[in-house]
């Protein structure tokens, strides 16, 4: 009898849950009977076979499968989604084809303001070294060149923008500028060919954004992959390379790349 699994994520990461939803979609396309356990962070956001939060007793015959420990290894050179698919090939003993190039999300039109550039300036607090230190300088460059922008995660200024509303902001923009964070996974189907990722030393761009149609800026640093986190910094074990991975990506370089992407969209 073929295994029937409910895949679920026990950690806190938004991006990890989206990656699992993508895997469920791929496995379903390969005629494998799996369901995604839709917890509160991704409720009503992803388009794959799923069950509602706390509804597992109604799905007898399926076995819960915790993805926290087996989702991926950052020390493995294969991209996350490739590692996942290899993992399930061993479980189901069959070749599995990667059938999509992004996270499948639920989208419909809602009315939102239009900006030239949507900026996703924050990322998970696990490591501050994924932050880019020059967003204020980039704001000045955009303003001086009369390019409208929104820091979409600035809740003090705009309130909480999430879900389909978030996707609509990105769809209406000419460029999305993001970091290696959950929202950048979330927009992968909406922001094709108009995304710029500022990539830190935590991992390589291809490791987490494999097949996404994104552009990126990335500095070659000897310390990648970076495991430093906020606890290391608190105890004085900071980056011995002075955050080169992000500091060497200057605001003018990012601005020039934004202009290139805008020119393509206008062409």
Image: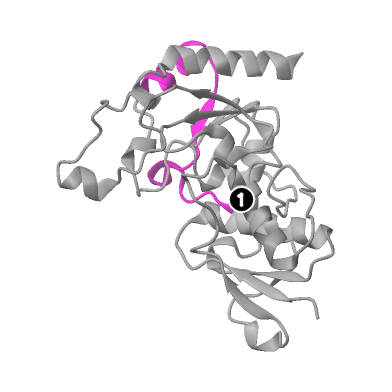
What residue appears at the point 68 percent right and 13 percent down from the top-left corner?
263
* Residue 154 is covered by the magenta coloring: yes
Placement of the N terminus among the 4 image quadrants? bottom right
> At 70% from the left edge and 53% from the top edge, which residue is drawn?
105
124 shown above or below 120: below
The vertical placement of 240 against 18, above or below, is above
Return the x and y of residue 211 as percentages of the image width and height: 69, 37
Q: Which residues are magenta?
A: 136-163
Query: With 58 as the anchor, is 197 left or right in this view?
Result: left
Q: Residue at x 64, y 49 (%)?
A: 81
Of all residues shown, which one is farthest toward the left? 236
Q: Which residue is mark 1?
A: 83
Of the pair 15 and 225, the residue shown nearer to us: 225
The coloring applied to the image is: one colour
Q: Quadrant of residue 33?
A: bottom right
Q: Is residue 112 visible?
A: no
* Up-down relation of residue 96 to residue 132 (above or below): below
Residue 172 lies in quadrant:
top right
Q: Which residue is at the front of the view, 200 or 136?
A: 200
Q: Secondary structure at mark 1?
A: helix
Q: Position of residue 244 (x, y in %)?
A: 33, 23
Who's the residue at 77% across and 13% down the image? 267
Q: Quadrant of residue 154?
A: top left
Picture mark count = 1
Other-residue count near label 1 (Cα within 10 Å), few / some / many at <14 / 14–19 / ≥20: some
Image coordinates for residue 3, horizontal then vertical, percent: 74, 76
**In the image: residue 144, left or right of residue 166:** left
Question: Is residue 255 rendered magenta in the image?
Answer: no
Is residue 33 visible from the viewing direction of this image? yes
């Amino acid at each position: 009898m073929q295994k029937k699994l409910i895949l679920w994520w026990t950690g806190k990461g938004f991006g990890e849950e989206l990656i699992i939803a993508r895997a469920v979609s791929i496995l379903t396309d390969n005629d494998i009977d799996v369901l995604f356990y839709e917890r509160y962070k991704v409720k009503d956001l992803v388009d794959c076979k799923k069950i509602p939060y706390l509804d597992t007793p109604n799905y007898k015959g399926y076995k819960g499968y915790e993805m926290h420990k087996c989702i991926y290894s950052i020390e493995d050179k294969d991209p996350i989604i490739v590692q996942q698919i290899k993992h399930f090939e061993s479980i189901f003993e069959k070749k599995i084809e990667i059938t999509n190039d992004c996270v499948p999300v639920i989208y419909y039109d809602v009315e939102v303001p239009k900006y030239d550039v949507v900026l996703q300036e924050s990322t998970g607090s696990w490591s501050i070294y994924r932050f880019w230190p020059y967003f204020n300088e980039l704001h000045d460059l955009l303003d001086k060149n009369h390019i409208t922008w929104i820091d979409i995660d600035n809740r003090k200024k705009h309130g909480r923008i999430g879900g389909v509303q978030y996707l609509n902001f990105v769809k209406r923009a000419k460029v999305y500028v993001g970091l290696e964070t959950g929202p950048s996974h979330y927009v992968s189907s909406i922001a094709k060919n108009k995304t710029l990722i500022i990539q830190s030393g935590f991992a390589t761009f291809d490791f987490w954004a494999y097949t996404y149609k994104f552009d990126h800026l990335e500095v070659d640093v000897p310390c990648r992959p970076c495991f430093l986190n906020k606890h290391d910094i608190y105890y004085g074990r900071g980056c011995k390379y002075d955050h080169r991975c992000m500091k060497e990506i200057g605001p003018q370089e990012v601005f020039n790349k934004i202009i290139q992407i805008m020119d393509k969209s206008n062409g």
